[in-house]
Amino acid sequence: MTLANRLTLLRAGLIIPYAALALSGQRLLAGILFAIAAGTDLLDGYVARRRNEETALGKVLDPIADKMLTITALIVLVAMGTLSGWLMAAVIIIAMRELWVAGLREGLIAGGGELPVSALAKAKTAVQLLALFILTLGDVWFGYGLFWAAAALTLITGYQYTVVTFRVLNLGSEETTSAR
C-alpha cells in the first residue's frame, strides 16, 4: 500500500476519535485530531503525485475520506450547538454539495470518465477545513465568517462541477445518438 493511501486511511481512522473527543467536551484534543486529519487531506495527493504513486484505490478512498471527515464534523458541531440557527442553512448547503459532487464523480467514473478537482474546489476545501477546525476549538466569530465563506464556495464549486458533468454526459449522449 502506498504512503498516500496510508495517509488517507489515517484520516478516516481519526474521524471517530475526533467525534468522541469533541462530543465529550475535549475541544482542544478534538481540534488537534481534526488538524492532523485535515493535514493528511492536504498531504496525500501531493505525496501520491510527488512519488508517482497515484492509484485507482487512492482516487476512490480520498474523496470518501474527505466527505466522511467533513460531514462528521458538521454533525458534531451541530450536536454541540456550535452550528445552529441560520448556520444550519450553511450546514445543509455543504452536506448536500458534498453528497451531490460525490454522486456526479461516481457517475462519470462509471462511464469511464473522471471529475478532476478544480483549483477553486481546493480553495473551498482549505477554507472549509480551517473553519471546521476553528469551530471545533470553540465558538469563534472568525470561524463563523469562514464557515459562511466555505458555504459560498461550496455553492459555486457545486454548480461548476454540475455544469462540467452535464456537459460531458450530454456530449456522450449526442455522440451515442449520432452514431446510431
Image: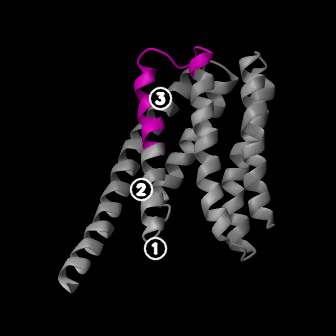
Q: Does the CB distance between marks 2 and 1 fall below 8 Å?
A: no
Instruction: Assess disc 3: are there few (<14), some (14-19) or many (≥20) residues with their C-alpha within 10 Å of its C-alpha.
Output: many
Residue at (77, 39) in percent of width and height = 14
Question: Which circle's residue, 2 or 1, is located before the other in the chain?
Answer: 2
Crowdedness near tag 1: few (<14), some (14–19) or many (≥20) residues, C-alpha within 10 Å: few
* x and y, in percent, of residue 149 in the image: 45, 36
Q: Which residue bears the numbered disc 3?
A: 91
Q: On the picture, is 105 further left or further right than 15?
A: left
**Is 9 drawn above or below residue 147 in the view shown?**
below
Cβ–Cβ under 8 Å for marks 3 and 1: no
In the image, residue 141 sits, relative to residue 177, either above or below, namely: above
Span colored in magenta: 78-98
How far across and down, in percent of the image, does residue 16 sit? 74, 33
Residue where numbered disc 1 is placed:
112
Q: Residue 53 or 122: which is nearer the viewer?
A: 53
**Mark 2 residue type:** Leu
Does 111 appear in magenta?
no
Q: Which residue is mark 2?
A: 104
The stretch drawn in magenta includes residue 89: yes
x%, y% of residue 175?
24, 80
Helix, strand or loop at mark 2:
helix
Residue in view at x 78 percent, y 49 percent: 10
Secondary structure, mark 3, is: helix
Q: Amino acid at mark 3?
A: Val
